[in-house]
Every structure is written in C-alpha cells, then in structure tokens.
Image: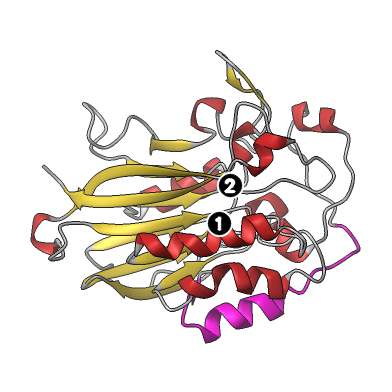
Amino acid sequence: MAEAHMFTLRRQRVPLLEPGSVPTSGSLRVLHLSDLHLVPSQQDKITWVRALADLQPDLVVTTGDNMAHRDAVPAVLEAYAPLLGIPGAFVFGSNDYYAPAPKNPLRYFLPHRRITPSPRTLPAAELASAFREAGWADLTNRRARLSAAGIAISAVGVDDPHLDRDRMPASSGAQAGLHLGVTHAPYRRVLTAMQAEGAALILAGHTHGGQVCVPGVGALVTNCDLDRGRVKGLHGWPGPRPDELGGADSSWLHVSAGLGTSPYAPIRFACRPEATLLELLPQA
C-alpha cells in the first residue's frame, strides 16, 4: 500500500510545435493529471497536487476520474485550487459519474464488455460547473479554442469511452496551429478518430499504468482495448512516435498512469502514481 502514496512527477519533452509558434520561453508546458480517485481524507494527495502549481505550467489538462466519494468535490477543488487560474481543459471518466464498487480483480483479464454503472451517482455536474466557472474548457463531446503562452490551441474531447458515452463532435472548421485530443479511456476507436483529424497530441488516462505490474514484464492489463505496450507514457498512434522513421503521420499519445486507485483496491506495485509535465518543443 505504501507505493500508492509515492506520488511521482514525470517529465517528457515532445517536439511537435511549429517553429514559428514557439513562445518566448522556448516551450509550451502542459501539466497532465488523471485518475485522482480522491476521497476527502487523502490530504497527502491533495497537498502534493497543490504543489504542482510551483511548476508554472502554461496549460493544465485533466483526463477524469477525479472522485471516489460522493463528498469529494470540495477536496478535488482544494487540490486543484492553485491550478484553476491557469488555462485548462477537462473530460470526465466513469468515477466522476458513479461511485466505485468492489470488483473481482480477475474481471480485468476478461474481454471488454459494456459497463453496468453503479446506482450510486457522484456530483459530476457540480464539479464540471466549478471547472467551467474557473475558465477551464469542458471537452465532454465538445470542441474548444484555447490560448496558452501565446499559442493558439484547438482541442477536441469525448465523454468516457469506457461507458460508451464517447461521441466525436462535428468539425467546427479550421484547426489552430496546435490541435489536441483529450479522452479519459484510450480506446482505439477514439485515438484513431482523433489522429485522423490531425491531433498532434492525444492525452488519456484510465489505465492506471496497469496498477499492479510485474518487474521485467510490465502491465498485465490495460482495462481497455489499448495494447499493453502503451499502457502508460509517451508513444505514437497508430504507429511509431512521430519523430521516428515511418511515423510522420502518427500523433503523439500520452497515457497517464494516474494518481489514485479505487478505495477498494488501494494497491500499486511497480507502478507509482504520477502526474506528467509535458514540455512541447519546436519540431526539428
């Protein structure tokens, strides 16, 4: 259980900006947060997330599953408070809508089937309203235009594919110089749709990085139809990373291993909880 509290900051450098769009700082710093699964008593997690504001990101993106308790909205807002004044965007996951429930861990080795939502709902509308009032873009089956560090950004997002709630919104015309895709669960159908419309970077969570991994082997499951080789970290979609030979048409894909667990399975092994600071740099 100790590893579930070993919060870790990952850093990734991603060469995807057009050379003429580089801000004066030389990069666009994107803080990617996911899967807090927060309950009000987790003060260590709240304190750690609040301190991420010291990184001075230009953009914050959260890919859902913020809550694990019906009274968690104030705790989530306390954790995010120093970040809410920064340009941001969000989508939700199943554990923003429905409370977690005990599950047989062996079910994760079965083929994906449609999820039956828990009858215990969570106050997702209240949390979404607070995020929107702070100025964060709601990408729940929506598109938005953002500006961060002087860079124009277009973004497209979907509701949780794990609940089959994803609906790619209709195109709204020309994209900005930097086009982002945002989803909670990295299902192949969603990644392919976002890559097809030119998303330079796709952000996702949901997988918990496998949560319980085998040293030398890695994750055993992804809890979706994504391959285990891309269960966390920075990769390309559908092929090699865009900076590698043969991958020029691919999008960058970043899957966060997330910061939490279900309260019914508060264990991580060989897979520390994480947030990631993505430093977007000019292409060579």
Say the numbered circle drawn on residue 48: 1
Asked if residue 221 is positioned above or below residue 153 in the image, the reply reads: above
Say the numbered circle drawn on residue 134: none
What residue sits 75% from the left and 68% below the top? 72
Q: Position of residue 101 (x, y in %)?
A: 88, 50
Which image quadrant is residue 91 in?
bottom right
Read off the magenta span: 118-138
Q: Position of residue 131 (x, y in %)?
A: 56, 78
SS at badge 2: loop
Question: Type of residue at label 1?
Answer: Trp
Q: Residues within 10 Å of mark 2 (few under 14, many from 20)?
A: many
Q: Is residue 183 left or right of residue 174?
A: right
| 2 or 1: tag closer to the N-terminus | 1
Mark yes or no: residue 173 visible: no
Q: Residue furthest top?
A: 216
Question: Type of residue at label 2?
Answer: Gly
Asked if residue 42 is positioned above or below residue 135 in the image, the reply reads: above
Q: Position of residue 51 (x, y in %)?
A: 48, 61
Q: Position of residue 17 (x, y in %)?
A: 20, 54
Asked if residue 208 is positioned above or below residue 142 in the image, the reply reads: above
Give the quadrant of the N terminus: top right
SS at badge 1: helix
Say the numbered circle drawn on residue 258: 2
Q: Nearer the viewer, residue 236 or 172?
A: 236
Q: Quick check: marks 2 and 1 in contact, CB under 8 Å?
A: no
Q: Residues within 10 Å of mark 1 (few under 14, many from 20)?
A: few
